[in-house]
Image (cartoon, rainbow, N blue to C red):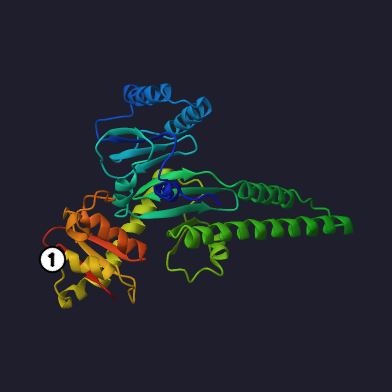
Amino acid sequence: MDSLRLTRVRRLTQIESAPLALTAFLPLEEESSLSQTRLEKLREKAEKALAKHPDRKEAENFRTNLDFALGQLTDASPPGTWLIAVTPTVAEALFLPFLWKEDINLGKSLRIQPALYALYRTSIAFVALVSEHTTRWFEAIGERLFPLSLPSHIKETLAQLQKARNQVQSISTDSSQYGDLFAQMARSAYHMALVKYTENLRSAVTFYLRQENVPVILMGDERLLEEISNGIEGERALTLIGGIPETASLEVIQGQVQQHLAHQRQVQEQMYYPFLAYSDKQTPQEIWNLLQDSLPASPVLFVEEGYKLPASELVGKKRSLPSEDGVDLIVAEVREKGGTILFLPPGRLPQPIMLLLP
């Protein structure tokens, strides 16, 4: 099973050096687009570095990966930024649902860590629309969906299911002994194909829940959703949304994701907000220190929208910090501990940043 694009990009932070590494941020505001001029500027800078590179094979691999990464780009909406990370062995493009300063950096290391820490503020999920006729997968970053390719074994079992269904539908009205036998064989083949298809989908859901550690939103045929969730229905991060037609447009699916996320935030706020009145005052440094220890429960972090503090106030003046914003560091720690982050408008919180341990 393929990892989510975000997971793959996060793993790149472990790559300390490469023969040649390009990190580019291409912001898309309301009036901007991925014009050919902007892309040519990126290519021109890359070509200048490649001209000085001694290894021709690595240079060609870099060009191939750059072409692949740029092929992933689209004029995205709402406003955000495309992060492009390329080496001779790596090619990734990830949409960030916030505006980032435009930048193109070439060197021997990827400079993606600040953006990834900022992404900890964003919800990530695996979304699938499933039926007996089709399966569509998406990676949800914030409220935007990015289509995912189906693995070959999912495509194969879906094709087998469709073939078996066609055989059942083509059963003749012949009531002879042979006619009944062929009908039983066709129905048995259909049932076996459906079981195999369901098992493969359940395995995929389990992978994204437990290996990728992201919430999963399953939509589509209610009967099929029940079968897929059988055995994993106790997972808190699994959401089932039935009644969504298999022909639903991307806008409809995206609207369902947005509605689910909004409802989830509302439920979490109603659950945890009342406890803030009984919470002791905490400084950002005290919150940071708490997060460095083993905690008895998953933490809940409340943050006032727009609140920032220098990262150096938390960890001292280190030369290489993953983010200059201390809130990014705290949010990342909460996410890593399986916690919840809730951003509220100014004036709603007794303090700009507060940590609860339920």
Q: Which residue is mark 1?
A: 351
Which residue: 58% across, 60% down?
203
Q: From this viewpoint, which residue is outermost toward the front?
A: 54
Please tell me whether residue 89 is drawn above or below residue 131 in the rendered image: above
Q: Quadrant of residue 182?
A: bottom right
Q: Horizontal and vertical percent for residue 74?
A: 39, 34
Vertical placement of 130 versus 107: above or below?
below
Indicate the secondary structure of the residue bearing disc 1: loop
Total numbered badges shown on the rendered structure: 1
Where residue 113 sits: x, y (%)?
Answer: 33, 47
Q: Amino acid at mark 1?
A: Gln
Q: Is residue 264 visible?
A: no
- Say which quadrant the C terminus sits in: bottom left
| Residue 314, above or below 286 | above
235 or 334, which is in the foreground?
Answer: 334
Residue 252 in the figure: left or right of residue 308: right
* Label 1 CA crowd tier, 10 Å (few <14, some 14–19, many 20+): some
Residue in front for this viewpoint, 128 or 1: 1
Camera sees residue 93: yes
Percent x, y of residue 332: 31, 58
The residue that appears at 24% across and 68% down in the rendered structure is 289
| Pick the front one: 28 or 11 | 11
| Residue 22 position by quadrant | top left
Residue at the spot x=47%, y=43% of the render? Answer: 147
Query: Residue 225, how many percent across, how many down?
Result: 53, 61
Q: Residue furthest right?
A: 177
